[in-house]
Image (cartoon, rainbow, N blue to C red):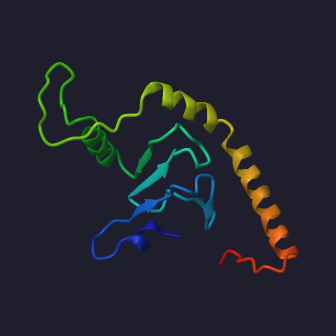
């Protein structure tokens, strides 16, 4: 599937991949279709850092601009001068270390979630409940 399919009237896709880390769509990982993708590391996700997440960018220019916006818009480390309105979206090192440790086990975590999904499906089917399948 070509990601240019997701550009409409010159507007790029910003993919919300918050709940789909480890998932594939047409044999491609979710989060790789749009110009940007957001993956959440909130407490109820596949990987958690206690909060925060990651922004995926297709090109280096976008990544540099996003990093600049997310680090209070200070262009130099030796000057306390803001060249525009910015934000402090940096993840603390302790939280990042927690995420890095979990990313090493992401495949096992995804397998576990899929197994749990099968168990839920089986349970609801035995209770006579309708189970919706993926398209």
Q: Height in image: 128 above or below 103?
A: below
Q: Quadrant of the C terminus?
A: bottom right
Furthest-right residue in this view: 126
User: On the image, which quarter does residue 132 sit in?
Assistant: bottom right
Horizontally, is 61 left or right of 134 in the view?
Answer: left
Q: Residue 43 placed where, x, y %?
A: 56, 44
Q: Nearer the viewer, residue 126 or 24?
A: 126
Position of 62 with respect to 26 (left or right) is left
Q: Is residue 4 above or below residue 31?
A: below
Q: Where is residue 73 drawn, in percent x and y?
A: 20, 36
Residue at point 41%, 33% (across, down): 91
Choose top left, top right, bottom left or bottom right for residue 63.
Answer: top left
Q: Which residue appears farthest toward the top when viewing the image?
A: 78
Q: Residue at x 45, y 44 (%)?
A: 54
**Residue at the (13%, 41%) spot, across then down:** 84
Does 128 appear above or below 108?
A: below
105 or 123: which is nearer to us? 123
Q: Position of residue 7 (x, y in %)?
A: 36, 71
Horizontal and vertical percent for residue 41?
A: 52, 44
Foreground of the two, 46 or 29: 46
Q: Quadrant of residue 60?
A: top left
Q: Nearer the viewer, residue 7 or 71?
A: 71
**Residue placed at 59% from the left, 43% from the top?**
47
């Amino acid at each position: 599937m070509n990601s240019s399919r997701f550009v409409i009237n010159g507007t790029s896709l910003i993919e919300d991949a918050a709940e789909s880390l480890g998932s594939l769509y047409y044999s491609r990982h979710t989060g790789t279709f749009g110009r940007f993708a957001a993956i959440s590391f909130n407490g109820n996700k596949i990987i958690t850092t206690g909060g925060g997440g990651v922004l995926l960018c297709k090109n280096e220019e976008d990544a540099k601009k996003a990093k600049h916006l997310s680090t209070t818009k200070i262009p130099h480390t030796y000057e306390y001068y803001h060249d525009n309105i910015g934000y402090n979206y940096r993840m603390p090192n302790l939280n990042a270390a927690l995420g890095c440790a979990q990313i090493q086990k992401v495949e096992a975590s995804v397998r576990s979630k899929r197994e749990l999904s099968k168990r839920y499906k089986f349970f609801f089917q035995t209770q006579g409940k309708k189970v919706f399948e993926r398209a």
